[in-house]
Image (cartoon, rainbow, N blue to C red):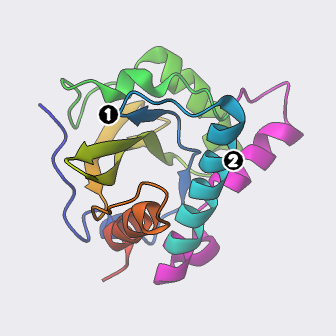
């Protein structure tokens, strides 16, 4: 089953709980152009920061933990937590993944220390950020998986799609995507 495009408010039921939003794990581009490591690192941090700010602005605020928090937890606890940018989440990108599935052990064991440090059991994993070509336009897509880190199960998954833009460097490429994610979690 391919993850469906996520409907507005799909994660609103989790707004009152503590959820840890980990850093986006991978980048894909239909054009086949892969950014350099330095470009991707900067893009990822900027995207993670924008995503955290947009979710916090929905009224959730600091009830949730965001990528910058996760990175700080890992830096302060290097002997306990692994690299929050390399959770082995590629296995969550598969078309056969569905709600109720057990997490692959590599992902589960990478998430457990982070959710413990974040004082939660739930993690929202941005599995990959993708730029898709639509003729002369481009749009961004984000695969999200909400997991119960203690139970090692998939609670929700979906793809969030931003608006198509004519220039892939247009700030709107990611801005509309981030707004769509915030709409998923906005308390009703």
Is residue 117 found left or right of 184 in the rendered image?
right
Is residue 42 found left or right of 59 in the rendered image?
right
Secondary structure of the residue carrying tag 2 is helix
Residue at 33 percent of width and 28 percent of height: 93
Q: Was residue 103 drawn as part of the magenta stretch in this picture?
A: no
Which of these two is toward me, 161 or 182? 161
Which of these two is toward me, 123 or 144? 144
Residue at 43 percent of width and 69 percent of height: 172
Q: Which residue is mark 1?
A: 30
In this view, the mark in front (1 or 2):
1
Label 1 crowding class (10 Å Cα cut-off): few <14, some 14-19, many 20+? few
Quarter of the picture containing the N terminus is top left
Query: Picture quarter containing residue 114?
Result: top right
Q: Position of residue 162 (x, y in %)?
A: 31, 61
Q: Which residues are magenta?
A: 55-83
* Badge 1 or badge 2: first in the primary sequence: 1
Query: Picture quarter containing residue 128?
Result: top left
Name of the residue lying farthest toward the top: 105
Is residue 88 found left or right of 173 in the rendered image?
right
Residue 133 is at least partly visible in this image: yes
In the rendered structure, find residue 42 and report the number of the disc placed on it.
2
Q: Please name the predominant secondary structure of the magenta segment in the image.
A: helix
Q: Position of residue 167 (x, y in %)?
A: 40, 59
Residue at 27 percent of width and 61 percent of height: 164
Question: Against 130, is 15 above or below?
Answer: below
Q: Was residue 61 drawn as part of the magenta stretch in this picture?
A: yes
Question: Against 61, is 160 above or below?
Answer: above
Report if the CB atoms under discs 1 and 2 are less than 8 Å apart.
no
């Amino acid at each position: 089953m391919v993850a469906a495009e996520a409907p507005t408010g799909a994660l609103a039921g989790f707004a009152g709980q503590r959820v840890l939003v980990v850093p986006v794990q991978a980048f894909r581009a239909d054009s086949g152009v892969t950014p350099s490591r330095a470009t991707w690192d900067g893009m990822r941090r900027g995207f993670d920061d924008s995503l955290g700010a947009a979710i916090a602005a929905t009224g959730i605020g600091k009830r949730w933990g965001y990528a910058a928090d996760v990175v700080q937890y890992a830096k302060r606890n290097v002997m306990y937590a692994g690299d929050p940018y390399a959770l082995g989440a590629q296995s969550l990108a598969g078309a056969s993944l569905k709600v109720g599935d057990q997490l692959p052990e590599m992902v589960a064991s990478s998430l457990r220390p982070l959710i413990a440090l974040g004082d939660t059991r739930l993690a929202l994993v941005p599995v990959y950020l993708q730029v898709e070509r639509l003729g002369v336009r481009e749009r961004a897509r984000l695969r999200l998986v909400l997991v119960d880190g203690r139970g090692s199960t998939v609670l929700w998954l979906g793809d969030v799609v931003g608006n198509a833009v004519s220039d892939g460097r247009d700030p709107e490429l990611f801005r509309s995507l981030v707004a769509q994610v915030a709409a998923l979690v906005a308390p009703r």
